[in-house]
Image (cartoon, helix red, strand yellow):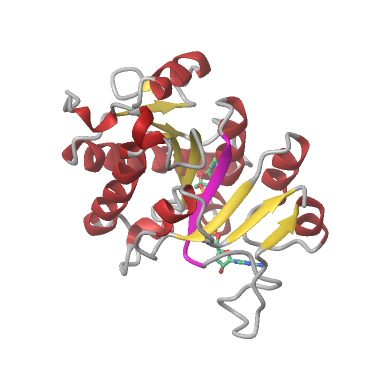
Amino acid sequence: MPVISDRNTPSPERNKKSKYKRILLKLSGEALMGDGEFGIDPKVLDRMALEIGQLVGIGVQVGMVIGGGNLFRGAALHAAGMERVTGDHMGMLATVMNALAMRDALERSNIRSRVMSAIPMSGVVEHYDRRTAIRYLTSGDVVIFSAGTGNPFFTTDSAACLRGIEIDADVVVKATKVDGVYDKDPVLHPDAVKYERLGYDEALDRKLGVMDLTAICLVRDHDMPVRVFDMTKPGALLNLVVGGKEGTLIDRG
Ligand SMILES: Nc1ncnc2c1ncn2[C@@H]1O[C@H](COP(=O)(O)OP(=O)(O)O)[C@@H](O)[C@H]1O
Ligand SMILES: O=c1ccn([C@@H]2O[C@H](COP(=O)(O)OP(=O)(O)O)[C@@H](O)[C@H]2O)c(=O)[nH]1
């Protein structure tokens, strides 16, 4: 039973501070592990709930997509011998588990939230329906879109871009472990140089690995801006939503 509180009630006064009315926030599954090597660190969930609550508090409508890489990835299961589609189905189910854990953390912080799944899962979560999702968002509920796109061979980055476009978000915000997009992977190359802003075509041409190319094509074709930022930095999410400089903006340049 959701905890009802007024933390989701938008107020025009508070809304003045936000640069965006509606965002799609993508959290990588791996980021939920914290310092662990598998699974979910409750401390990370609670911190994210706190940060999402700050957005809701200033009237931002928040849609979310959470990855599943902390539990299962289709490609990794396939590499270990499993049939790829089965592996992808397990990966998508992993995102539902993460979504349930996030909803639990949000509701413990008195933030009303809903989980929708691209794969019907009657009795566990609602089936994804765009118009219903928009109704929930408009009423101030956080909506977590789980099970990716519902199709194998895609990623949750693509799901985030897809849902962001569908719900008419102002921006897709990708929360990850690095503080933006670099000219090469900053984890492997300490001399990598960060972009403040980057065009879709440059991200595609240079195959910058922070987001998969299918996702970038989708946002390019629908002119949806993406901001990549470091979710381990406390306060960064609120800062970027109120217009502060955080991470890298990918747009048409
Ligand atoms: N050009 C790049 N700029 C930034 N990060 C990059 C780049 N190329 C690869 N990466 C990697 O992408 C990761 C972020 O993507 P993300 O989808 O959150 O991770 P994962 O795929 O492990 O869940 C970073 O941890 C970083 O190592
Ligand atoms: O539309 C989708 C989204 C995800 N997945 C599967 O779910 C896994 C977890 O998603 P992802 O790797 O994007 O999670 P993240 O890297 O963000 O933690 C992927 O590896 C895929 O196997 C899928 O098949 N279709």
Tally of marks: 0
Give the image quadrant in which the ligand numbered 1 is located. Answer: bottom right
Percent from the top left, x then y, of residue 247?
55, 62
Question: Left or right: 208 with respect to 134?
Answer: right
Question: Left or right: 156 with respect to 57?
Answer: right
**As drawn, 21 above or below 242:** above
**Magenta stretch, residue numbers:** 170-178
Percent from the top left, x then y, of residue 202?
80, 58
View extreme (bottom): residue: 191
- Determine if the magenta segment contains residue 171: yes
Residue 83 in view = no
**As drawn, 120 above or below 92:** above
Does the magenta stretch mainly form a helix, a strand or a loop? strand
**As drawn, 119 above or below 250:** above
In depth, the one of 229 and 2 nearer the eye is: 229
Q: Which quarter of the figure has residue 163?
A: top right
Percent from the top left, x then y, of residue 73?
50, 51
Question: Left or right: 95 with respect to 75?
Answer: left
Percent from the top left, x then y, of residue 82?
53, 49
- Determine if the magenta segment contains residue 42: no
Q: State the quadrant of the N terminus.
A: top left
Q: Which quarter of the figure has residue 16?
A: top left
Going 44% across and 15% down the picture, which residue do you hit? 132
Going 16% across and 28% down the picture, which residue do you hit? 3
